[in-house]
Each structure stands twice: as C-alpha cells, then as structure tokens.
Amino acid sequence: MKKTTIISLPNQKTERKRINKTNIFEEFSLDDSFFTLGKDKLYYIYTYGCQENEADSEKIMGMLNHMSYKRTMDVEKADVIVMNTCAIRKNAEDKVFGEIGRLKPLKRRNPNLITIICGCMSQEEVVVETILKKYQNVDIVVGTHNIHDIPLMLKRIYEGHTRIVNVLSHEGTIVESIPVIRESKIAAWVPIMYGCDEFCSYCIVPYTRGKERSRLPENIINEVKKLKEEGYKQVTLLGQNVNAYGKDFIDIKYDFADLLTDLHKIDIERIRFTTSNPKDFDSRQVDAMALGGNIMPQLHLPVQSGSNKVLRAMARRYTKEKYLDLVKEIKAKIPNVSLTTDIIVGFPGETDEDFNETLDLVKKVEYEGAFTFIFSPREGTPAAKLSDPLITDEIAHERLYKLNELVNEGYLKGNMRFLNTIQDVLIEGISKNNPDVLMGYNPNGKLVNVKGDKSLIGQIIKVKITDAKSWSLDGEAI
Ligand code: SAH
Ligand code: SF4
Ligand code: F3S
C-alpha cells in the first residue's frame, strides 16, 4: 500500500452531532504560489448525484481554473481527475466504484495522474476504508466540508506526498467567495443553504453534508443581482430543505418567504428552487411563491410515501392528510402550478395496504412527474437496522413498476395541458437527439423542442405548442 498522509478521517458518530448553534463563515482566498500550479495541465471532472454536487463541481472547476488548469472532455488526456460522488443509494456508490476501477489503467500509463475523490461518498467511513485498501489509483480524498482545501492538497502531492486523506466530520462552515466556472451561461445554481437537520430515518445526507446552515441574505441577493448583470436568465435556489432557510439565524429574523419576496424584486427573469420539504412549507411561503412573475409555477415537493405509518417510520414529520392540505393550498393560490415529487417504495414495514395509500395519494395530487426509488439501506442510518423479509426484491420491483405506470400517466397529462397553448420558452441549447432542433423550458419546467436558429439560445421566446408527449413538448416559434 502506498504511503498515505491522513489529516482527518470521516467519523459518522461525529457527523451525527449537532452542537454549534452559530454558523461559522469563512472567505476563500489563494496566495500567488497557487496560480501556476496547473499550467499546461488538464483536468476531467465527473459529477454524480444532486444539484448541490453540480454546484460544488462548478466551484471545484473555478478553483482549478484559478490555478491555471484547463478542462478536458477526454478523461484519457487528464492530469487530474476529480470524482464528485453521491452516496444516496447503493447503486449510486456502485457506479462510482465501477468507474474508479476502470480508471486504474490510466494511472499505470501515467504515474503522474492525480485522482481526487470528493462529495458525499468521501464522508463515509466504509468508503474511505475501501478506497485506501483497494483503490491505489486514488491520490486525494476530500470531504464535502472542505472542497476549498483541494488546491492545497494538490500542492502537497506535487511536493511529494503520495496520497492524502482530509475529510472533516464537523458540522460545517459556510465558505464564501470560492471562484466558480458555471456549466451554463443561461441558468445558474445558487446554493442558499448547506447541510440538513431533518434526519429522515433512511437518509445519509445529514451525515455527509452536516448541519443545516443558511447563507446570509445579502450574499444570496448580491449573487443573484450579479448573475442578472452577467446575462443569466434563471437562478435555481438550492438546499436540501429550502423551506427551513434562515431557521438557523440567531440574530436576524429572515426566512424563505422573506428571501423569495426579496428575490422577486430583482429583475432576473426566472427563479426556481429545490428541494422543498412539506413539513416546513408554511402559508407565508406559499404566498411568497404565489407572487408569481419571475417565481416559476413549478414545485418539487417530495412526499416519500402516502402511508402515515411509513411516514412515521421515515421520520418525515407530516401526515398524508397534512400533505394533501398543503397541496390544496398551493393549488388554490398558484392554479397553474406543476407539482413533482420523490417516492420511496419497499421501505421496511411497507405492506400492500401502505403501498396502496401511496398510489391513492399520487392519484389525488395529480403529479406531473416523480422520481421513484426502491429503499436502499445506508449504513449508519436508523432505517438500515430495520429489515423486512416480506419485501423481497421482486415485490419492491413490482411496486416500483406499478407506481411508475401511474406516474408516467401524470407526465403525459401534465404535458397535454399545454397542447395548442402559447408558452414562454427559455432556450437553453440544442436538442440532444436532433442537432437541428433547439431545446428549452416553459415556466412550468416542461422540456420544449422547437425549430429555430442557434442565435435564439439564451432568449425567452414565444412558442406555439403543437405536440405533447410524455417526456417533452414540440412547438413552433411565433
Ligand atoms: N432533501 C431532499 C431529498 C434529497 S435525496 C428532500 O428531502 O426532499 C433525493 C431523494 O432520494 C429523496 O427525496 C428520497 O426519495 C431518495 N432517497 C434518499 N435516501 C434514500 C434511500 N436510502 N433509499 C432510497 N431512496 C432514497
Ligand atoms: Fe435526506 Fe430528509 Fe434531509 Fe431530504 S430532508 S436530505 S430526505 S434527511
Ligand atoms: Fe447524493 Fe450527497 Fe446530493 S448523497 S443526492 S450528492 S447531498
């Protein structure tokens, strides 16, 4: 095994703790000695998981760019490979391990190649152990709380360290001013908070991302204003539970409703946000969303299950009835809203009856889309200790299939309602399937394909919808 410098290893027991009441803020900076470290070198970045990881990858790219590295889209040419990983379900982790394994020959061909593992998997003890034992081609393991240490860790490798692990398990700081290279010139991610304090019984995120901590309102507002000045048309506010934004402030009273109201006043064309937690979505927030205008009529509102028994076991802290009440209020105040959700099937203890409650809820809400998952036990979470011999793989897959059939009807219905209407479509690029066709999204977040000139990319144009399919709309520019 090659010599490893262990600065800090993840520890799930510490990750579980919530002790600090106040948030710690830091400003990112790099001294001149870093600026040429990446000269004539290329990096390749893999991003798995949620939008939060996508936003982190943009910061990692920003830092690497600051160090003079250039990005390559060909992993074989890379001098540095970054894998920004996700731990949400076992299959997400398997994918990453598969890929690290496939990269082994590259290291044999180029011993100077540096491979960095970051993201949520780095925060897991078992993962780091496995990497240290079985994946000699990994040089740096860094956690979600200190991606800003990547420049220093790279420098240490160039200075002769063979392998460094530095994963913090504290509750997390808020680091401002990390440079960013955004993937899009049109739509930008804007994290408004980090971490999660919900501790849903199945979920690894509160361990991997630490304490819920909100960025200061002025930093968010200034970022959005700057994005507007740079020509961005859309911002998506990010957090694991955006509805809890500001609840961690001690000396100011300012919540998600206040933030939405303030951002509504900025003339950025489109504001979206994700993810919402029904438990913290109060009437003031619904009212703020109902201001409309640049706040888009689209809401992702994960429900997880329609059975009160299962919701309790998941520690979701709302009931089916409460959820339906919230949906009723949202639909009454934002009549045009498109609702989507996340659902887990096969949670330990879920009976056919419980599952039917979920199907019933899906019918009642009339979701226009959903991400559906089979429960995946995550080590260290309370639900991982539960087992249910009655839920075989086959039963879980049957439930998933049945649920998806229903959900797919919702996708189609949700698109059909726009047939023959005129929609404002923000053109974001060229269709993946057809280079002659542009793609964009309407206010409700529906994918629209439209014939037109490339010069329209980045503009909001009027489109007559001529065809509606399950996964997309077709239209003509008018
Ligand atoms: N913070 C968001 C969700 C983040 S994870 C929220 O609370 O809504 C995205 C989705 O992954 C979750 O909504 C859930 O449906 C699913 N998920 C999380 N942990 C899971 C697990 N252990 N097994 C299966 N699905 C899981
Ligand atoms: Fe996980 Fe629940 Fe937090 Fe979402 S709210 S990230 S599901 S613990
Ligand atoms: Fe995955 Fe971490 Fe996001 S586990 S879903 S990358 S918060």
Image (tube, rainbow, N blue to C red):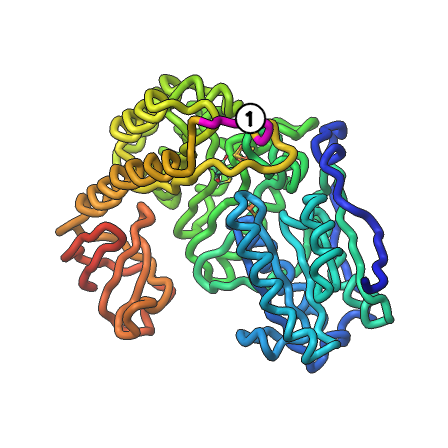
Q: Is residue 38 left or right of residue 188?
A: right
Question: Residue 161, percent across and down?
Answer: 85, 66
Q: Residue at x 69, y 66 (%)?
A: 115
Q: Which residue in the structure is indicated by mark 1?
A: 386
Quadrant in which the C terminus appears: bottom left
Establish if 468 lies above or below 199: below
The majority secondary structure of the magenta stretch comes to loop
Q: Is residue 387 magenta?
A: yes
Point out residue 422 in the picture as x, y percentages from the top left corner: 19, 52
Q: Quadrant of the N terminus?
A: bottom right
Q: Is residue 88 left or right of residue 407?
A: right
What range is drawn magenta here? 384-389
Q: In this orientation, does residue 198 appear?
A: no
Depth check: give the residue in front, 426 or 8. Answer: 8
| Nearer to me, 311 or 131 | 131
Residue 125 locus on image (x, y percent):
72, 44
> On the image, which quarter does residue 475 sit in?
bottom left
Q: Position of residue 102 (x, y in %)?
A: 58, 67
Disc 1 residue type (three-letter): Leu
Is 196 on the left-hand or right-hand side of 18? left
From this viewpoint, which residue is outermost toward the bottom?
40
Q: Mark 1 near ligand 1 (CB under 8 Å)? A: no
Crowding at mark 1 (Cα within 10 Å: few <14, some 14-19, many 20+): few
